Amino acid sequence: MPVLIDEDLVLEENGQLRPAAVANRWLRELPVSGAPAARTWRVYADALRQWLEFLADRVVDPFGERAELRDALSSYAGHRLSGPLEKRLAPSTWNLHMRALSSFYRWLVDEGHASAVPFSYKQGLRLLNGVPREYEYNLAKVRQPKPHTTIKYLEPDFAELFVKALAGLRPDGTSDDGYRGRELGRNAAMGELVLATGLRRQEFTHLLVYEVPPLPRERSVVPIPFAAGHGVTKGSKQRMTWISYDALAKVHDYIELERPLAADGSPWRPSGEPLQVTKPDWEGGTINGTRLPWRSLKPAERLRLLAPGGGSCLLALQTSGAPFVDWDTVFRRTSRRIRARDEPRFPIVSSHRLRHTFAMRTLELLTRGYYQQAAGLVADTDANAGLALYLTKSDPWQVLRDLLGHSSVTTTQVYIRRLDATQIFKQAYEQVGLAVGLIADDYDADDAEAGMPDEAAPELEQEGS
């Protein structure tokens, strides 16, 4: 856990705890105060450190009077939002820092370390699943764009271009002779996996080869369930997402053809104490003599796992058999190569953009009824009836909420506003109309579309993603 330490290493002064020592008490309570993620602890600690340093430079008591703290907060806002370039924060980062400081000061008041909170709040009502709920808004936060306008994702042609580039291919599918990259099968398989599952960076980076579901004997129309263990998920929440048959087939191709070249007989050893795995299966393995489920293992523990035949147990390996974790660099370099050689509008891709792409692609398919129709086919054959029932009885955004691991459906509903609903229902009308004879066989979709008003969303065109 993060710890704040003053430069002189002193924790008390004149019989009183220093602000850093008090802050450490708050930080230690974060895991049981609604912030279980280790990354959140670090972000909150960093936000608090910067605030305390600002106050110390101006000789302001962080536990002092409300009026003095509000003056300091006003100066801090000017310093971080419009001050020196190297000190400025993006609006989203500023709001995150204000959330952390607000939580800290409320804790100070509850614990008796301070008598006042330097923030002002307003009360309001919002609908949550159709039920009005009261909420409180911190007036120190700055206004941001609507959530749905900040979602960055890849359009289908850009997603296809990205996967081809990961595999060392040109846009037309031919080999890129001018590129000398390595582990192309691994990179393309992992790119396909993220696009088809929506896993977060920590989740797919620390995925074990044993956790990849088996490939069905026959090609499946309905996606295949894909478990994400609570040891690596955000908030330690176990969840089930899914993966398409084609994407899973490419992952298995990597596992069977390319990965053994790096893993078999590898002399690699982790930097910490090795965790030797024996008798692995899909659910777990014997680790240093103790049977444990994979889902309980944390990222740091997964990096120390040694496979029975050598090398790391992670799905993605380096040529030495060591685990590969630097996916941000791979995605960034691939994006820049595409921009320089093929498509100057191509965005710099992050793992989160791929997650958004999965969300938008899945939501559009659900909205079109694609998965519901596929579920009907499966239900008729009495295969995987549970998934079929889930697909046909749930609203699209509720299905997507569960796949992404969101706590509330309101978080997921921001994706709804990015869909071109007019185009989706127009295409659905055409498909159904042709099937049942409501539309003539010589119906020309291009002519019909030419008569429609141009309602393209400018922000989507500008993103190019």
Image (cartoon, grey):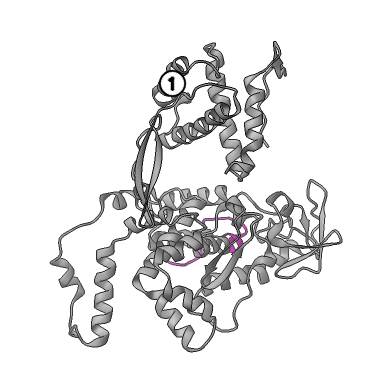
Quadrant placement of the C terminus: bottom left
x then y, percent, for residue 245 = 53, 74
Q: Main secondary structure of the magenta part?
A: loop
Residue 27 placement, left or right of 290: left
x then y, percent, for residue 42 = 60, 36
Q: Nearer the viewer, residue 110 or 412?
A: 110
Residue 366 placement, left or right of 55: left
Residue 217 vs 237, above or below: the answer is: below
x then y, percent, for residue 414 = 37, 53
User: Is any atom of residue 169 visible in this view?
Assistant: no
Residue 6 placement, left or right of 414: right
The residue indicated by pointer 1 is 79
List the single residue furthest toward the left.
451
Q: Nearer the viewer, residue 28 or 348?
A: 28
| Residue type of the residue flagged with mark 1 | His
Residue 15 vs 118, above or below: the answer is: above
Q: Nearer the viewer, residue 403 or 441?
A: 403
Q: Which residues are the magenta region? A: 171-187
x then y, percent, for residue 441 = 20, 85
Q: Is residue 260 magenta?
A: no
Question: Residue 129: which quarter of the image?
Answer: bottom left
